[in-house]
Image: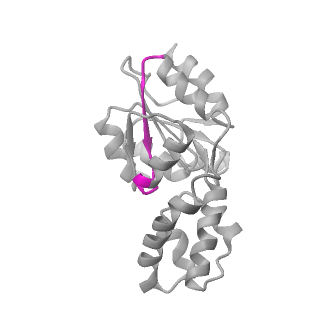
Amino acid sequence: MSGSASVPPDLVVGFDLDMTLIDTVPGFRAVLRALGEELGVDFPVEAMTAVLGPPLETILAPFLPPDEVAAAGDRFRALYPAYGVESVALLPGAREALAAVRDRGGRVMVVTGKFAPNARLHLEHLGVEVDVLEGSVWGAGKAAALRREGASVYVGDHVHDVEGALAARITSVSVTTGGCTAAELRAAGTHAVLDSLGDFPSWLSTRVA
């Protein structure tokens, strides 16, 4: 890894949520099916859940008339607590990755494109405590929250998570548990690619050392 400053003593690490900390696919799939039944639309659920990362309306837009997308997004978010939370689990290594930050006296942020109240439902259901939750931000839009809290590292699974870290001028760490390949993440400019969050504690140990 090159081109990034060392982790400061006042360690603040940001994490994306969907497909970085949690496997959102089962919940997202269930909400899409419920929404499709209400709207009378046969969404290609498997294809749509394979590209999680962009804003919800971007995912819905190819399958709805333009003037119906915003309302469908609002309805998706309203259905989410009933259909999208209980089936979603932490990804392997997530709890240990957060603990690695805590063990060094650090603070944990979750910075996600997900609607913040629904993101909080996931954290509460899974017993995950964070210091800061910022929702409904995507790509470079994540930079403002990262800068505000003094984050030095942002961990995500998507090229747009890399974009957010680079816009904040902090270290980008990427995991390949989402829809982007290691080659795509490197091409986007990430500083480190890990197979999963299971590799994050050792990466952080080396980084701090």
Is the residue 8 above or below the residue 177 in the image? above
Foreground residue, 112 or 126? 126
The N terminus sits in image quarter? top right
Q: In this view, does 184 lie above or below 70?
A: above
The image position of residue 112, as x and y in percent, is 45, 49
The residue under the point 64% across, 65% down is 30
* 19 lies left or right of 119: right
Residue 191, x across and y down, in percent: 54, 35
User: Which of the two residues, 126 or 135, is positioned nearer the viewer here?
Assistant: 126
Q: Can residue 30 be seen in this view?
A: yes
Residue 134 point in image, percent of width and height:
38, 46
Q: Position of residue 117 (x, y in %)?
A: 41, 53
Q: Is residue 72 above or below residue 209?
A: below
Q: Nearer the viewer, residue 35 or 161?
A: 35
Residue ranking furthest to the top = 209
Q: Which residue lies furthest to the front in this view?
A: 82
Q: Does the magenta stretch include residue 28?
A: no
In the rendered image, is residue 1 in sight? no
- Name the side, left or right, on which 23 lies relative to 9: right
Task: Examine the image and state in which quarter residue 74 appears.
Answer: bottom left
Count the numbered circles shown.
Answer: 0
The residue drawn where x is 50% and y is 69% is 76
Q: Is residue 110 magenta?
A: yes
Q: Which span is picked out in magenta?
A: 104-117
